[in-house]
Image (tube, grey):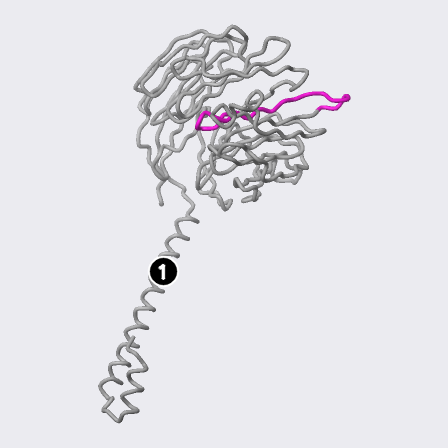
Amino acid sequence: MPDIREYMKSKKEGKDSSFIKKLLIHRVAVFYKIVILIVALIAIGVGIYVYFENKVYTKYNVISSVERTDTQTTTYYKYAQGILKCSSDGASYTDYSNKVIWNQTFEMNHPMIDICNDYVAIADKEGNKVYVFNTKGYLSEINVNLPIEKLQVASQGVVYVILNDGTGSKAKVFSKEGEELAKSDWAMVKSGYPIDIAVSDDGEKLGVSFLYVDSGIMKTQIGFFNFGSVGQNKIDNLVSAYPYESSVFPRIAYVNNATAVAFGDKKVAIYKGNQIPEVVKEIEVQDEIRSIYYSDSYFALVFDNSDPGAKYRMELYDLEGNKVLNLKFDQDYNNIVINEKEFIIVSEMGFSIYKMSGLEKFRYSSQKTLLNVMLEGASNRYVIIDSSNTQIINLKLN
């Protein structure tokens, strides 16, 4: 816009200001046209965003469909750019067209599997071996002399195992090549029994939920161990601990490198810290938790629901402990998959995709038993694994 003061000065000095006056009017008109255009563009952009955010899809294209001949006990996991398959006879990594990238045979009664980025660790519960893989295949076999109770792997391939000798528990840390890096002994009478563990992505922090009995009352202690430089001068590498009376925490998870969440029967606790985790939020839980699901940005608690017309109720929280959504739904479910913008409720014969607002974006019915549903990577593309096929579908607007 022109300088108003220049116009007023020229008028005061008696100069001919008609040109400046016209120029001022013209520039004001142009300015307001630009403002109107910008507002219109913003409104159009917001309208498009709202349209797609609230769009309900009813159709889809099948991008690919491949038959499989896996055993009935095979389980399927989203892994890297494809699928990890695991059974008591072995494990394999395939792309979505079922092309085998690597395959490993073994014999296990109850395989335990943990995946973190490109690394996979597999062990037999109560067994003595851990197999470590990355996307290229087999890396090492770790042999231990005590039964394996728990297993976790970090993003660099660092493996944590919890071993039980009958009188206490040991945490051992191994490199992806199988070299022992650290260990910590926990006397059961002192620490309690470790019912769950969680490892941070950087492989340095270990969260443990210890269950113990004190004066006939079940109690839990959530302990955090640092196996990096920060925990070297601490007893047993313990850097922080939080006791909970009259409460049991059967699950603990590192949802990202700096955030751990402990799920209890009476509360959920959120801990944050790059080196020494500290509790930042506790959420009181009134009803019995039926299921727990989480991603690196959210966690969900599922409860039985007493209201007619909806069997279940799901509470979705962000990692600050803020409730994002309270959703009631009626379909039975086997799994809930959460990502940044949506979540998928998977049942035996179908699944529903919901936006974080609670809007049901898409519903799918299957003729065969569903084993897993995954986000393929691109927006609106999903991998559907049923009892005999792997399909990739793309949602259509109409």
Above or below, 133 against 6 in this view is above
Residue positioned 47% across, 41% down in the render = 354
Residue lying at the far front in this picture: please name it: 233
Q: Which residues are magenta?
A: 199-218
Q: Residues within 10 Å of mark 1 (few under 14, many from 20)?
A: few
Position of residue 40 relative to residue 358, above or below, is: below
Residue 396 coordinates in the image, percent (x, y): 35, 42
The residue under the point 30% across, 71% down is 33
Was residue 8 drawn as part of the magenta stretch in this picture? Answer: no
- Quick check: is 201 in the magenta stretch? yes
**Where does the C terminus fall, quadrant-wise?**
top left
Q: Which residue is mark 1?
A: 42
Instruction: Tell whether 135 sits left or right of 332.
Output: left
Query: Residue 345, how many percent across, how many down?
Result: 50, 34
Q: Residue at x 38, y 12 (%)?
A: 140
Assign the magenta stretch its main secondary structure.
strand
Instruction: Return the x and y of residue 394 as percentages of the image width and height.
Output: 34, 37
Q: What amino acid type is highlighted by mark number 1?
A: Ile
